[in-house]
Amino acid sequence: MHNNIDALIEWVGTTEKPHDYEDGSSLLITMLFELLAVCNAEDMYNHFRGSFAGEVNLQTAHCELDTFELEPLLFSKSIYREMYVETNIDLPENFQVYKNTLYNQSEEKRVYMTDQAGFGFLRILANNYNKNEFFVSEWRAYLHPPEETSLATIAEPALPTNDVDSTSLP
């Protein structure tokens, strides 16, 4: 699992795919679909789903190390050996089913010391410099709980009243 940037540059430069270029799987596209769920962008999900569902092996990265062990590694090396990749992620036709599935798989957001000290941008820069993947806990923590869709849970909005308290008049 390693991005071959040279093959990508060759393809863009020559408009011909090199034999060692592979685009059958993606961690980034999976992240983008999950961000659509975080933003509740159902129309965009439905628009793009057909282009990728079944066409690209959608994947996402996870790490079982605790944050205390992981954080120094993010600043010092590529952590391919410390992570694992979930593959063959499905994009259901129903957007709400997709959101509920993600919510049920949510991981607790990691609390990094670097972020707490106000230097979260340095962690992101180090992550990119060492070509590490972002973990789902970075954005799944922002998913809202599944919404109830039954009519019994939909409350009518309160209408403003023009009642005037007569005791407050002069």
Image (cartoon, rainbow, N blue to C red):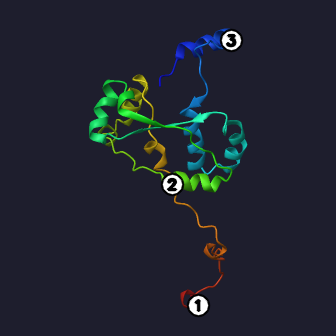
Q: Is residue 31 left or right of residue 160?
A: left
Q: Are marks 3 and 2 in contact (CB under 8 Å)?
A: no
Quadrant in the picture for residue 158 = bottom right
Q: Residue at x 45, y 50 (%)?
A: 141
> Which residue occupies the foreground of this view, 56 or 138?
56
Going by the numbered disc 1, the residue's amino acid type is: Ser
Query: x%, y% of residue 84?
Result: 42, 35
Q: Residue at x 59, y 21 (%)?
A: 22
- Image vertical order of residue 157 relative to residue 85, above or below: below
Among numbered discs 1 and 3, the one appearing first in the sequence: 3
Among numbered discs 1 and 2, the one appearing first in the sequence: 2
Quadrant in the picture for residue 16 = top right
Q: Is residue 144 left or right of residue 72?
A: right
Query: x%, y% of residue 98?
Result: 60, 51
Going by the numbered disc 3, the residue's amino acid type is: Glu
- Marks 1 and 2, how far apart at CA: 50 Å
The C terminus sits in image quarter = bottom right
Going by the numbered disc 2, the residue's amino acid type is: Tyr
Q: Is residue 67 left or right of residue 4?
A: left
Numbered-mark total = 3
Q: Name the secondary structure under disc 3.
A: loop
Tag of residue 16: 3
> Which residue occupies the foreground of this view, 22 or 139?
22
Tag of residue 54: none
- Image vertical order of residue 97 relative to residue 55, above or below: below
Using a 10 Å C-alpha cutoff, classify the residue at mark 2 as few (fewer than 14 neighbours), some (14 to 19) or many (20 or more): some
Q: Which residue is mark 2?
A: 103
Residue found farthest to the top: 14
Q: Which residue is mark 1?
A: 166
Judge depth for marks 1 and 2 and give the one in front: 2
Q: Name the secondary structure under disc 1.
A: helix
